[in-house]
Image (cartoon, grey):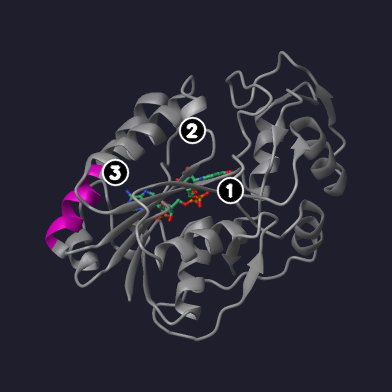
Amino acid sequence: MKIVVIGGTGLIGSKLVNKLREQGHEAVAAAPNTGVNTITGEGLAEALKGAAVVADVSNAPDWEDTAVMKFFETSTRNLLAAEAPAGVRHHVALSVVGTERMLESGYFRAKMAQENLIKSSSIPYSIVHATQFYEFVKGIAHFSTDANKVRLPPVLIQPMAADDVASGVASVAVGPPVNGTLEIGGPEQFRLDELVRRGLAAWKDPREVIADPQAHYYGIAVSENTLVPGNDARLADTTFATWLTQSAAQIPTAHPQATGVAVGSKETKGKEGQKIAS
Ligand SMILES: NC(=O)c1ccc[n+]([C@@H]2O[C@H](COP(=O)([O-])OP(=O)(O)OC[C@H]3O[C@@H](n4cnc5c(N)ncnc54)[C@H](OP(=O)(O)O)[C@@H]3O)[C@@H](O)[C@H]2O)c1
């Protein structure tokens, strides 16, 4: 099956392209640096020729309120418009668990706008809501640092490895459209301050993490369950401790090749008994 991965050179996209190729699919990494731009339309029609599925795991280069809204609206409109004449049968998009609960943020208003455009289009679709990536924990710490102290609300969070996110999106992309939203998450819940404290300790970062119920998450107020998925979420296996060990050992991640198909896949089982293929 030809599957075009929009944002196929990014953190999730490059892993997704590799996983789809390992399963024997023709996965195309589409991004500005491979000559495909969803904002200008450059290379889009050509890339979508013969594609059965489009998986959009792109991200905006600028997260300022107006810029990020313009990115996701323009990109999604252009993509959906190009998919119809190309005969694409399934549009998959990666978004974030709790998007609808974080609309105080310009970034999440833009993700919501992306989701609404997908829902109102004629292309069958699946929206995958993932929890925060372990790879994102450092960024959360940096954003919340003031005078060497990291202040975070002690709300629940159920993060996951980017590798598991890619596996979750891959298994949705090769399946039938759900014409709805499904959630994927990590195997454990943490308090946000505890997660960041553990990460900083592992990275030998001396910053002090303070649990502050008044503190914001990326500039917005969040409550106990804003960031956690529901009971039906598909849960991945990789724990934060395992990921920390693996990333400290700097296990190399293969980059997508221009071409190439391999066979074979394995499956890991989530806590709720649903599987995320890896
Ligand atoms: N961070 C989290 O914890 C989290 C949690 C759940 C969901 N998500 C979602 O995951 C998605 C992927 O995130 P990521 O961290 O993997 O992103 P990323 O590493 O920043 O990669 C972004 C990708 O988008 C591409 N892109 C940018 N502008 C484009 C354009 N005009 N046309 C086509 N492609 C374009 C980039 O290509 P170039 O490299 O060529 O610029 C790159 O391949 C996002 O939509 C995000 O909302 C994130």
How many discs appear?
A: 3
Left or right for 114, reference 158:
left
Secondary element at tag 1: loop
Left or right for 144, reference 128:
right
Mark 2 → mark 3, Cα distance in angstroms: 15 Å
Residue type of the residue flagged with mark 1: Ala
In the picture, which quadrant includes the C terminus? bottom right
Q: What stretch is highlighted in magenta?
A: 77-85
Mark 3 → mark 1, Cα distance in angstroms: 21 Å
Secondary element at tag 3: helix
Secondary element at tag 2: helix
Identify the residue under disc 2. Answer: 99
Q: Does the residue labelled 3 lie within 8 Å of ligand 1?
A: no
Asked if the magenta segment contains residue 187, the reply would be: no
Q: Mark 3 or mark 1, which is nearer to you?
A: 1
Q: Which of 23 and 77 is in front in this view?
A: 23
Q: What residue sits 53% from the left and 60% below the top?
A: 168
Which disc is residue 233 wearing?
1
Image x and y of residue 96, in percent: 51, 40
